[in-house]
Image (tube, rainbow, N blue to C red):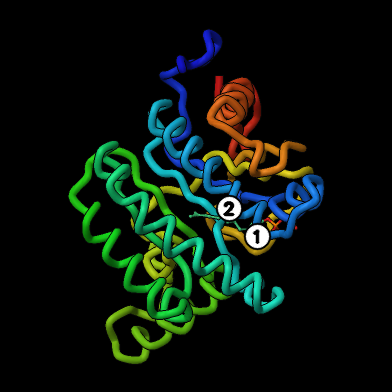
Amino acid sequence: MALPTNFNSSSVPEHIAIIMDGNGRWAKKNGKARIFGHKNGVASVRSVTEGAAEAGVKFLTLYAFSTENWNRPKAEVIALMHLLVTTIAGETKTLNKNNICLQAIGDLDSLPSNCQSELSKAIKKTSTNTGMTLVLALSYSSRWEILNAVNSLLIDVKSGKLEQENITEDDFKNYLCTKDIPDPELIIRTSGEHRISNFLLWQAAYSEFYFTDTLWPDFRKENLWEAITNFQNRERRFGKTSEQIK
Ligand code: FPP
């Protein structure tokens, strides 16, 4: 499938982050249990990953499991972890074929051990790929990440590794899970919800937001390209006036 004719390949966001939402409602609409929605969401993950790489995106971050998602019914959490393990294991070959490097952010130590081992295997196997980087946010929340960063930074200040005076934004960024990843220019949320839900709060300072009513299991690469085209028609001022940036 070709990129749309109005697509500007010279103005593609370097990093796109997606809050994949609406799996449960999609399943309900189809008279099925919630996990059916999650399972169908994997096809969207595949299509969007492929579409992002085709569009020339360098980093794609997917919010796959939040810190707060641990509070869901136990059976749903177990089923989601199982789905993550099987998807990660099953998709490694395709990631390699497409030169995609897998990374993960979040409190990865809190994941079940089989999930941790599949994840590190896939990360290792794809680590030399030089195309797009696919970042899975797992057991991730931004408040967790920021607190974690503050605690690690304080340890370094105490040990003298970091000077207490004049800690800069760049110093702080070095303590975040995303230290090696540029801030997302575009954040997409599916399913008609207009919230950030504890996702990339520091990194989203100047992100453009794109909301769509499409439920995640119905979202495909064409929808991603539509979001990118929408982004390309926006004026990003970063606090300056329109005249200044012209
Ligand atoms: C939100 O929908 C979706 C999730 C919490 C899980 C997303 C997981 C997948 C798409 C499965 C596989 C992912 C990867 C990256 C391998 P929801 O359950 O909150 O939907 P609702 O708001 O309609 O209830």
Query: Which residue is most to the top?
Result: 5
The C terminus sits in image quarter = top right
Residue 193, image x, y percentages: 78, 48
Query: Which residue is most to the bottom?
Result: 158
Q: CA distance from mark 1 to mark 2?
A: 6 Å
- Badge 1 vs badge 2, beta-carbon distance below 8 Å: yes
Q: Mark 1: which amino acid? A: Ile
Q: Tell me if 213 is positioned left or right of 67 in this view.
A: right
User: Can you tell which mark lies on residue 35?
Assistant: 1
Residue behind label 2 places its C-beta within 8 angstroms of ligand 1: yes
**125 up-or-down from 134: above or below:** below
Q: Tell me if 82 is positioned left or right of 54 in this view.
A: right
**211 up-or-down from 180: above or below:** above
The number of discs equals 2
Q: Secondary structure at mark 2?
A: helix
State whether residue 242 appears in this view: yes
**58 up-or-down from 143: above or below:** above
Residue 242, quarter of picture: top right
Q: Measuring 57% from the left and 65% from the top, which residue is drawn there?
A: 80
Q: Mark 2: which amino acid? A: Lys
Q: Measuring 59% from the left and 47% from the top, which residue is drawn there?
A: 41
Provide the residue designation for mark 2: 39
**31 up-or-down from 6: above or below:** below
Which image quarter has ligand 1?
bottom right
The one of 68 and 14 positioned closer to us in this rendering = 68
Residue behind label 1 places its C-beta within 8 angstroms of ligand 1: no
Q: Using a 10 Å C-alpha cutoff, classify the residue at mark 1 as few (fewer than 14 neighbours), some (14 to 19) or many (20 or more).
A: some
Residue 198, image x, y percentages: 65, 64
Q: Secondary structure at mark 1?
A: helix
Q: Measuring 37% from the left and 38% from the top, which residue is drawn there?
A: 58
